[in-house]
Amino acid sequence: MKVLYQLPILPPKLPQAEAFSQEIKALSEHFNGELIYLNPNERSPLYIPRFLFGFQRWPEIRRREAEIDLHHIYNPDPFAYPILRWLRRPVVYSISGGVGERPPNLNFFKALGAVTVFDEQSLERLQHWGLRNAFLVRTGIDTSQFTYTPLAPQPPIRLMMGSAPWTLAQFRSKGVDALLAAAQQSPQLQLVFLWRGVLAAEMIERVRQLQLQAQVTVLDGLVDVNQVLATVHASIVLATEPNLVKAYPHSLLDSMAAGKPVLVSRAIPMAEYVAATGCGQIVEQVDAAAILAAVDALVANYDQAQFIAQRLGQQDFSQQRMITSYQQVYEQVLKANDHG
């Protein structure tokens, strides 16, 4: 089996630190896959809207179709990219964020080989709208990279955030500004931000202007995440909308695999998992007050949340489990295509 993976994002400066790239690397190694980026705006002199993504690589995609069995595209929201209608091989479309309350272009998605989602609520919505080709595939990480280092739940409380902004607007929508405001209000809160080479100078300047250098650490570049997690009590990911980050952010899965609880905003689909299992706390709003309330609640129940996070982190999100799930989807799609 040979798969052509496609991402509609700009090529990341640090693909080793970017969740999509990590996941596709694992899948590519197993399924003899290759990766192409569909977003042309890194080099285009004019801004290209996303409904045109991929057409600049059409000759290459058509040429590669002779060598592959299927296409697999990752996208945060269910956007109907016109390029996918032109493909001759079947398409697996992974919606990496949560599916909202409004139906997408159902005719478009019904025509695809398969649509996969990471959370149960998104699956239920798609099936309710009549998509019979929708599947749940839980995301996975290499849990063997992570080990548990105990840290007593006493001040200062130290949190890691790994979902850095790609744009200036995401300083607000991904809760960076709210986290900095929370640190201003609580001297006992310390923050470690994992950065990816984008807008690092802007972040460092914000920390300086707020005079938070003693409480905030910005690690820009590749780091040993396991070593960072050994120094923190928990990890946090915030978003005002479900499609801003993965439904199950890798940094939170890393955290659980290292035995550290998680804090996640209500808008992110993983919040349902956190509520059901008790592996952390939900942040009800992306603001300083809600963050501090969630931190206080986590500290009050830290030992239990830590125990649950450590137990579930190593079993629920294994990379092999993810690969096996995708293999089942791929085989079903190819079997249906052969009969079609």
Image: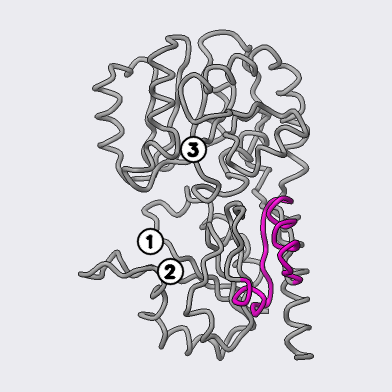
**For residue 225, above or below residue 58:** above
Residue assigned mark 3: 162
Q: CA distance from mark 2 to mark 3?
A: 23 Å
Q: Please tell me whether mark 1 sits on a helix, a strand or a loop.
A: loop
Camera-side residue of 329 and 113? 113
**For residue 68, above or below residue 217:** below
**Magenta-highlighted residues:** 106-132
Say few, some or many: other residues with alpha carbon within 10 Å of mark 1 (under 14 / 14 to 19 / 20 or more).
some
Which residue is rendered at x = 49% and y = 48% of the image? 244
Residue 222 image-quadrant placement: top left
Q: Amino acid at mark 1?
A: Leu
Residue 282 image-quadrant placement: top right
- The percent coordinates of residue 331 (x first, y second) are 76, 76
Q: Which mark is residue 37?
A: 2
Q: Earlier in the sequence, mark 3 or mark 1?
A: 1
Q: Is 156 left, or right, of 262 in this rendering?
A: left
How is colour applied across the structure in the image? one colour
Quadrant where the C terminus is found in the figure: bottom right
Camera-side residue of 104 and 274? 104
Q: Are marks 2 and 3 in contact (CB under 8 Å)?
A: no
Q: CA distance from mark 2 to mark 1?
A: 7 Å
Say few, some or many: other residues with alpha carbon within 10 Å of mark 2 (under 14 / 14 to 19 / 20 or more).
some
Q: Amino acid at mark 3?
A: Gly
- The percent coordinates of residue 25 (x first, y second) are 56, 61
Which residue is rendered at x = 53% and y = 35% of the image? 237
Residue assigned mark 1: 10
Q: Are marks 3 and 1 in contact (CB under 8 Å)?
A: no
